[in-house]
Each structure stands twice: as structure tokens, then as C-alpha cells.
Amino acid sequence: MKNPVTQPDASQKKAIGAPIGNTNACRSGMHGSGLPKGCEYIQRSCNEFRRALERAVEDARGEVLLLDAANISTAFRHERHCQLVQRWLRIDGDKMSHSDRLAHSREVARASAERDKAIMALKLPEATDADPWAVVDAQAPERPQDVARKETP
């Protein structure tokens, strides 16, 4: 059986551009699944987080190895889970019982701890002179509500 990614058949040839199935721009081949409606900002934020981890590993080692890609994927998934739970807590928190809110809060803390373990497993060199908040602020996309607040006097 032919592998459709590496061996396209003659009927799939394109007139211009890269051949179908090429992996020229592929870093690791791993990507996250879709999120529920209204969570596009979480997807963008987590994708930027994943790209930042990939850049950090490439800068430190020159390439992203399979184990690095798996750890990046794990950190990505835990970060996405954390942000989704925070969203549910923010949206439905007033409708939840105290025990449900505590369970969601524990889930955020657990996902954050698991994300941090996956990042630590990458064994990246520590940047002692960098201001971590400056890095976060520089990479955070500006939200529409923040833009509206700046424009109003």
C-alpha cells in the first residue's frame, strides 16, 4: 500500500508549487486538536506557547528530537487543558457548587504542575538575566477588549 504523504500517485500532481504531501515546513508533525466554539483565543495562545517551546529547544540544541517533540506536545496539551478549565470556571463558575468550583480549581493546578514537569523534562538552559514577565507580555496577543479600553478616554 502506498503512503499518501510520501508517495502521491500521478492523479495528485500539481502544476505549480510544492508537491502534495511534502514536509518541507514540518517541524515535528504534531499538532493539537480543535477546540469548542468560542475558544479560538485559547487555540492561538497555546499554539504560540508550543512554537515558543519549539524555538527554545531549537536555539538550545539546534533541532527538535522526538522526545523533545513529545514533551512539547505534553506541555501544550496540559496548557490547553488548564486554559479550558479556567474558561469553564469563568463562564459557569457562578452556576457551580462550591465542590465543583474547587474541583475545577484543583484541575487547573494539576494541569499547570504537569505542564511544568513536561517543560522541565526538556532540560532547557535557564536564562538568569531574562525578565519572565517581559517575555510573556511580548508574546501575548492583544485582546479586543483591551484595545477598546485604550481607545476610550
Image: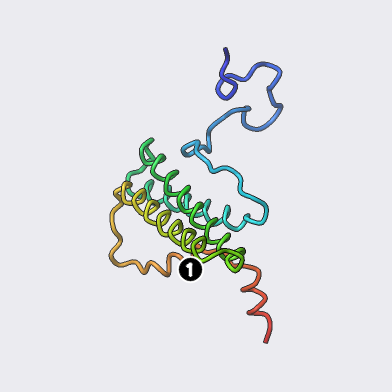
Q: Is residue 126 left or right of residue 133?
A: left
Residue 6: which quarter of the image?
top right
Mark 1, Cα crowd under 10 Å, few <14 / some 14-19 / many 20+, is few
Q: Quadrant of the N terminus?
A: top right
Q: Secondary structure at mark 1?
A: helix
Up-down relation of residue 15 to residue 153 (above or below):
above
Q: Residue at x 43, y 59 (%)?
A: 106
Residue 123: image x %, image y %? 29, 49
Given residues 110 and 22, the one toward you in this image is 110
Please state which of residues 87 and 54 is positioned toward the viewer in this rendering: 87
Q: Is residue 130 above or below residue 1?
A: below
* Residue pictured at 64% horizontal, 50% vertical: 36
Furthest-top residue in this view? 1
Query: x and y percent of residue 128 in the render?
Result: 28, 65
In front here: 135 or 98?
A: 98
**Residue identified by numbered label 1:** 137
* Residue depicted at x 57% and y 66%: 93
118 relative to 40 in the view: left or right: left
The percent position of residue 139, horizontal first and vertical second, equals 50, 62
Q: Left of 61 or right of it: where is 8? A: right
Tally of numbered discs: 1
Kindly identify the residue that appears in the image at 43 percent across and 69 percent down.
134
Quarter of the picture holding the C terminus: bottom right
Q: Which quadrant of the figure has residue 112?
A: bottom left
In the image, residue 74 lies at what x, y percent? 42, 45
Q: Nearer the viewer, residue 128 or 121?
A: 121
Q: Which residue extends farthest bottom?
A: 153
Kind of residue indicated by mark 1: Asp
